[in-house]
Amino acid sequence: MDYIEALRFLRDRAGYDRGFVANPFADEGIGLQRTAWLCAALGNPQQHYRSVHIAGTKGKGSTAAMLAAVLRTAGYRVGLYTSPHLHTLRERIQIDSEPIAPETFGQLMAELAAVDAALQAERPAWGPATAFELVTVLAFLAFARAEVDVAVIEVGLGGRLDATNVILPDVAAITRIGYDHMAILGSTLDAIAREKAGIVKPGRPVVSSPQEPDAAAVIEAVARKRAAPLWLGGREWQVEGSWQDFLFRCPGLELTGLAVALRGAHQVENAGVA
């Protein structure tokens, strides 16, 4: 299968017309089972490297990009999975800032298509994997084959039922939560926050942007229930200044004279999360 054939294969799947992110609540009974099955059949590639999982309404893509840049500067080989893309689907899957090669994408999709066929034969009631589920698993596989040290994984939609939520990250991060995808995630801030906080894993640290009280309360409750250490912006950590010159402060550490290439006061907050 070449790259063009891989794209045609994806176009036949649910969610393609919505940027590959199908409604995860369309059949909540299936949940993450299709993604988990595909991963298991491929040897659970998402377990072959360390990872950071990022959810939120605003700034999660910028935060993911900044974190990947920081990790590369520190000498790590880094995988980055984000959505949506601007020009080509390959932008969603990057290794050390380079989009996945067309040939590699096609080869991995051919491998994944065979596994997906086995899934449909063994679990016909589940239905075929969506485009987003397939691309997500392909990203996990690409990162494992490239032997990355760490992968930065951005949630597609929500968090709790997002295909990316099969990973067990070393750290979860939640950027600012606001009103988005309300028909799917809920009409209140605390309902939306519950979906975003679904990426918090037992005993694994979670870093959050400063949040509105309703959202912060939900994140705190989920972190407490799962014994996940919480670093909440404005409480456990602070940023002050402009994108050209700001400081970051947390217990035992203060960094000054920082700057980001992305303009805007909100990018300082995103940098703090990263």
Image (tube, grey):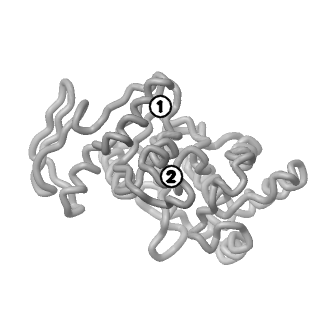
Q: Position of residue 156 (x, y in %)?
A: 52, 56
Which percent across, then down, holds residue 274? 32, 45
**Residue 58 screen position, x and y as percent:** 36, 56
Q: Is residue 40 above or below residue 180?
A: above
Q: Mark 2: which secondary structure?
A: loop
Instruction: Please name the residue that numbered disc 2 is placed on.
Output: 155
Res 207 label:
none
Judge whether residue 52 can be spotted in this image: yes
Q: Amino acid at mark 1?
A: Val
Point out the image quarter for the N terminus: bottom right
Q: Nearer the viewer, residue 170 or 6?
A: 170
- Horizontal and vertical percent position of residue 153: 49, 49
- Specify the amino acid type for callout 2: Val
Disc 2 and disc 1: Cα gap in Å? 18 Å
* Local crowd size for mark 1, using a 10 Å CA cut-off: few (<14), some (14–19), many (≥20): many
Query: Residue at 44% across / 38% down in the picture?
Result: 172
Number of other residues with Cα within 10 Å of mark 2, as a class: few under 14, some 14 to 19, many 20 or more: many
Q: Residue at x 69, y 49 (%)?
A: 28
Question: In the image as oriented, which residue stretches furthest toward the front?
Answer: 187
Q: Nearer the viewer, mark 2 or mark 1?
A: 1
The residue closer to the viewer here, 220 or 104, is 220
The residue drawn where x is 24% and y is 56% is 267
Q: Earlier in the sequence, mark 2 or mark 1?
A: 2
Q: Is residue 98 above or below residue 256?
A: below
> Which residue is located at x 48 percent, y 54 percent?
187
Q: Which residue is mark 1?
A: 222
Give yes or no for contact between labels 2 and 1 (Cβ–Cβ under 8 Å): no
Q: Secondary structure at mark 1?
A: helix
